[in-house]
Amino acid sequence: AQSVTQPDIHITVSEGASLELRCNYSYGATPYLFWYVQSPGQGLQLLLKYFSGDTLVQGIKGFEAEFKRSQSSFNLRKPSVHWSDAAEYFCAVGPTGGGNKLTFGTGTQLKVEL
Amino acid sequence: NAGVTQTPKFQVLKTGQSMTLQCAQDMNHEYMSWYRQDPGMGLRLIHYSVGAGITDQGEVPNGYNVSRSTTEDFPLRLLSAAPSQTSVYFCASSYDGANVLTFGAGSRLTVL
């Protein structure tokens, strides 16, 4: 069965500092990998996705993530955090062509200090 | 485009009552799904559909029914609500099986 681990429940960073959110997955084949962001009281918005090819993927809002097969990881990064990035971030894994059957991690709550 | 629309946004039920959470999308997406979000547990898949007339169970289907009579609509039914079903429910859709989901704004359900 597929699973996703986000080891950090809460992270606090200062505005302008760099950010890395960790994600480890368990899946028997090459998965589809995603990062979603959820602002308070809102639905989830896709930040970026990895299907195949270049292991460094760029997303919206200046985020990027790197797929490392040997470490079963898909960590999210941003060079300089803005106060508006405060939100909850979810990593998710899905089977190739699996049709909406995503497995989500438990989320990382990001707080940005001004 | 409205995207994915969920109604109601908030609902309070008593144990044993029934209700339907509505989900509609206007993007002609074939794939639709329901997730529930609970604190510290992320989102868990309840039911999903790969097209009109086709539904299947996800990770936590017990206590919920779905049907998909049209491409646009995917209602989630609670036949006899229980306090354990207190949660925030999200409907999502995608154009194909590539799992790029568009989410609704969510429906917060409280069962007393």
Image: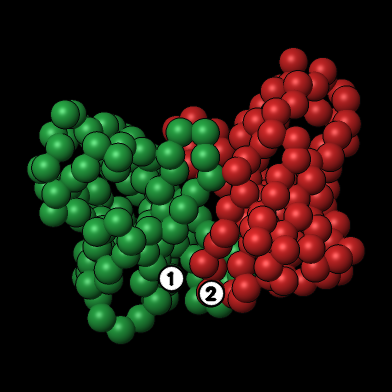
Chain colours: A green, B red
Q: Which residue is mark 2?
A: B98
Q: Is residue A109 above or below residue B93?
A: above
For image coordinates 25% across by 81% down, the residue present is A54
State the quadrant of the C terminus of chain B: top right
The 10 Å Cα crowd at callout 1, few under 14, some 14 to 19, many 20 or more, is: many
Q: Which residue is mark 1?
A: A32
Tag 2 subunit: B
To which quarter of the image does residue A89 belong? Answer: top left
- Count all numbered tags in the image, as a single digit: 2
For image coordinates 48% across by 37% down, the residue present is B41
Q: Which mark is residue A64?
A: none
To which quarter of the image does residue B27 belong? Answer: bottom right
**A91 or A29: nearer the eye?**
A91
Tell whether label 2 touches label 1 (CB within 8 Å): yes
Tag 1 subunit: A
Q: Is residue A30 left or right of residue B39?
A: left
Residue type indicated by callout 1: Tyr
Q: Is residue A67 left or right of residue A101?
A: left
Secondary structure beneath dot 2 equals loop
State the quadrant of the N terminus of chain B: bottom right
The 10 Å Cα crowd at callout 2, few under 14, some 14 to 19, many 20 or more, is: some
